[in-house]
Amino acid sequence: MIARFDLAPLDGITKRVFRRVWHARFGGADRCFIPFLSPTDQHILTPRDRREVENPEGLPQVPQIMAKRAEDFVWAAETLADMGYGEVNLNLGCPSGTVTAKGKGSGLLADPDRLDRFLDGVFSRAPVPVSVKTRLGYQQPEEFPRLLEIFNRYPIACLTIHPRVRPEKYRGQVHLDSFALAMAESKNPVCYNGDLVSVPGVRALESRFSNLGAAMIGRGAIADPALFRRLRGGPAATREELRTFTEELYQAYQDFYGQAAPASQRMKEVWFYLIHLFEGGERLGGRMRRSRGPRAYEELEAQIFQELALLDEPLGELV
Ligand SMILES: Cc1cc2nc3c(=O)[nH]c(=O)nc-3n(C[C@H](O)[C@H](O)[C@H](O)COP(=O)(O)O)c2cc1C
């Protein structure tokens, strides 16, 4: 039985403004992961990073760090520990070419010996528990047994596994057989992440892995903002709730940016997933994606709420 549900970090989406509004309106996640900070060797927390990790609302959050040098990771972990964080997360999953070219994110998985040295540096000096978010490998799932052996040498607070390899990004079938290996052989607690978008989907995972204690959900929780609540037996989102949520979020983005154009851009990124909760949403969703400017966005959103019926579960692939 899955006892803990985490909100995945989605850079550009689940940033501070989103987390605050979503948590107040729906929430239900035990922890919200903050999209990665990427410290440079200057060891300076930029004003943007600081804004992201400040937490006056007291949300249950775990910040994520992406680094390739242990000393940069440890510096960021110390800074975050000083701000009151009790856990930090290491990003070993990011598939972006600009990130992996620098040997960060899933780029660290390409050289297991280097990864081992990096983890040694991190775990010998980190001031707070460190959890890890990883893929199965850099190129192919066959790399995973070796990586798991390395992970097993360190006291990882939780090993969150997205069972895909880097070229697969976030599409295609997840490799559940490799995830099963982690369930059987990980010495550290394991959390599953990938493609959970509905209550039945989560229940199916639970019946396949009865010892699984934690799951992390990203896109599914944007497509259905009440998913965590429903997983705990609560009601589905109503149309009114969703309308209030999107209005409040749009307003919060406008307050944050001081203008409507970037706020509407952010909202379109949320709607990229949320539209799947509306019956026959492809047409208006596509129009919204292609639209320009806040006025067009506002009109299309009003039309979606006016014309489309709500589904029980998000429909289609959230890619
Ligand atoms: C737009 C976008 C941004 C993401 N940003 C991050 C990030 O900052 N850190 C991270 O570890 N994973 C990031 N991910 C990966 C997600 O956390 C998650 O692993 C992935 O979406 C699969 O889970 P899901 O199917 O529940 O969404 C991102 C994914 C997407 C689609």
Image (cartoon, rainbow, N blue to C red):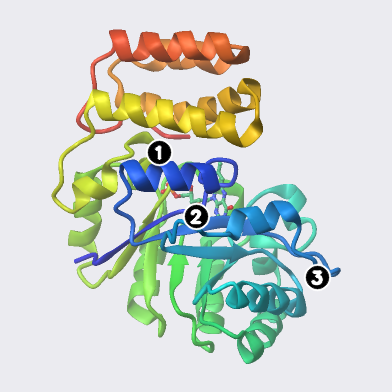
| SS under mark 2 | loop
Residue where numbered disc 1 is placed: 222
Q: CA distance from mark 2 to mark 3?
A: 32 Å
Residue where numbered disc 3 is placed: 43
| SS under mark 1 | helix
Q: Quadrant of residue 294?
A: top right
Q: Nearer the viewer, mark 2 or mark 3?
A: 3
* Number of other residues with Cα within 10 Å of mark 2, as a class: few under 14, some 14 to 19, many 20 or more: many
Label located before the other in sequence (2 or 3): 3
Q: CA distance from mark 3 to mark 1?
A: 33 Å
Label located before the other in sequence (1 or 2): 2
Task: Tell me residue 252's x, y (percent).
Answer: 51, 34
* Number of other residues with Cα within 10 Å of mark 3, as a class: few under 14, some 14 to 19, many 20 or more: few
Q: Residue at x 72, y 63 (%)?
A: 104
Q: CA distance from mark 1 to mark 2?
A: 21 Å
Q: Residue at x 46, y 42 (%)?
A: 172
